[in-house]
Image (cartoon, rainbow, N blue to C red):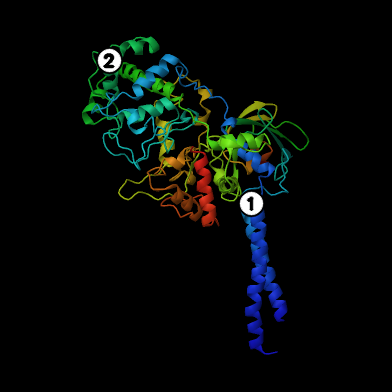
Amino acid sequence: MSSSTSRSERRRGFPFAALVALAAGVGLLASCQESEFTEAETATIASLSLDALGPLPPDPSNRYADERLAAAFGATLFFEQRLSRDGNVSCGTCHKIDRQFQDDLPRSVGIAETNRRSMPLADVARAPFLFWDGRRDSLWAQALGPLEDKREHGGTRAGYAHFIGDHYRDRYERIFGALPDLSSVPAAASPLGDDGERTAWAALPAAKQEEVDRVFANLGKAIAAFERSIVHEETRFDRFARVLAAGEEPAGDAVLTEQERYGLRLFVGKAQCVNCHNGPRFTDDHFHNTGVPAVAGLPEDLGRETGAMQVLADPFNCLGRFSDAPAEACGELTFMKAEGPELRRAFKTPSLRGAATRPPYMHSGQIATIEDVVAHYTRAPASDGGTSELVPLKINDRERAALVAFLKTIAE
Amino acid sequence: MTSRNRLLIGAAVVAVLVAIVLAVQSMMTPPSDLDLARSKATAGGLYVAAIEPDGGTVVQNELHAWTLTVTTPAGEAVTGATIGVDGGMPQHGHGLPTAPAATELGGGRYRIDGVRFNMSGWWELKFSISAAQGKDDVVFNLSL
């Protein structure tokens, strides 16, 4: 037998063996993917349904959290544009009531453009840490940040205290008791303001600073009380999941198409989306480096690495003097992972409910379409800093389209 | 020799495909032979450690506490131990999402506060135990 025959046989033989094996492999994969949901998948799907969402837990750090008067006052404050340096910016500017309380922009614009994408607010009261980097640990502490950020509302806590005294004294005092005497407080003063505002703040006696801080904290607590009422609405997926859990055949507005069911199966399985996007809010409330690229021209953004330090230092955190919680109710902060390489460029897992209809995506609007987001997660690029947790996935075009189709069922 | 080569190559291709399928599955499911014992001897045999979650069941996405009980192999309670807590998800290459801490309850029992599991799958809870008898470690597997 000549060696050339042998080589030619090998050339013929190899593709044949490979084809047989490939067919067997594809058959094995396909039989997993296309069949109906297994018991384990059905259980995971049920865990994603809004039916699995328990009652909203209390916020011990905010004693006004569930007071109706506070929530009503908070709603007024949320849409009050005079709570800004230029009189044009309210919370509702970047958290639009008819747009899932976000603004459709890559980076939000208050008085000026910020570095981050605004987050939707449905069920935000359940998040242990707020902002993309978790730099605040309660909804009320979160609300205070933008009020003094010079690119957002741009005001000062002293200015806000005066504004409340001038325009909302009755409503404030009915909830929080008497406003302090502000006659010695400058019109603009804050430890976070510009040079003049910081100097004015530093000139105030500590007791007066604390009185102003308390008014400021109370504004946050009222806004938080309002925001606790913003919740996720039932979607077609939730109806499907309910019927599936009951072992019945979905009908009418509970039907998921074959492609959507395939996408759901990939979501809870091979595509591994459910690792982080789990539970009825489709988030694990944690922070992950997923290799989302930095935005050219913006300052370095280390994400959770910076956010963890900031929340520990925040005077309005759960352990601070303006919190109503006993220390033992501050477990999220007390046991927070404050350092480690995995914090670098880690950002909060956003809920995927409604995500399909609110582009652009990621913490600074880096990705324009939901299709490109799915492509990002299957490609798993290296991170611009720190290490991405992602691993590349073998997901083909048809599977990507199915994932997108499924994501739309939790956005309608 | 050629047909043997063909067989070998074919087998290799099948093996690679099976490995890919298993690898994909392994990212999602814990190994089937995982030791899920809640009570075991520490690695060096200095102690016997047992863990129990508050409320009896392991919860996901909620901060919760465990009780760690440490005894000598003879069954005597180990008190005054310094307990270190670590862990993570071996299949994902990440640690615990929180920084749990231990408080001594007495009688060889230690409360482990601040535990959170933010994903389902295979988790490890690791304890380093330092007491009069010496330092030893133990790793518990959990399947969520």
Residue A185 shown left or right of residue A108 in the figure = left
Q: Which residue is mark 1?
A: A34
Q: Nearer the viewer, residue A354 or A274?
A: A354
- Residue drawn at point x = 33 percent, y = 38 percent: A108
Quadrant of the image occupied by residue A187: top left
- Residue drawn at point x = 72 percent, y = 45 percent: B35
- x, y percent for residue B13: 65, 68
- Residue drawn at point x = 47 percent, y = 53 percent: A375
Q: Residue furthest left?
A: A196
Q: Nearer the viewer, residue A248 or B50?
A: A248
Q: Chain of mark 2?
A: A
Q: Callout 2: few (<14), some (14-19), or many (20+) C-alpha neighbours within 10 Å?
A: few
Res. A167 mark: 2
Given this view, does label 2 or label 1 mark the residue nearer the observer? 1
Sequence order check, earlier mark of 2 and 1: 1
Q: Amino acid at mark 2?
A: His
- x, y percent for residue A164: 30, 16
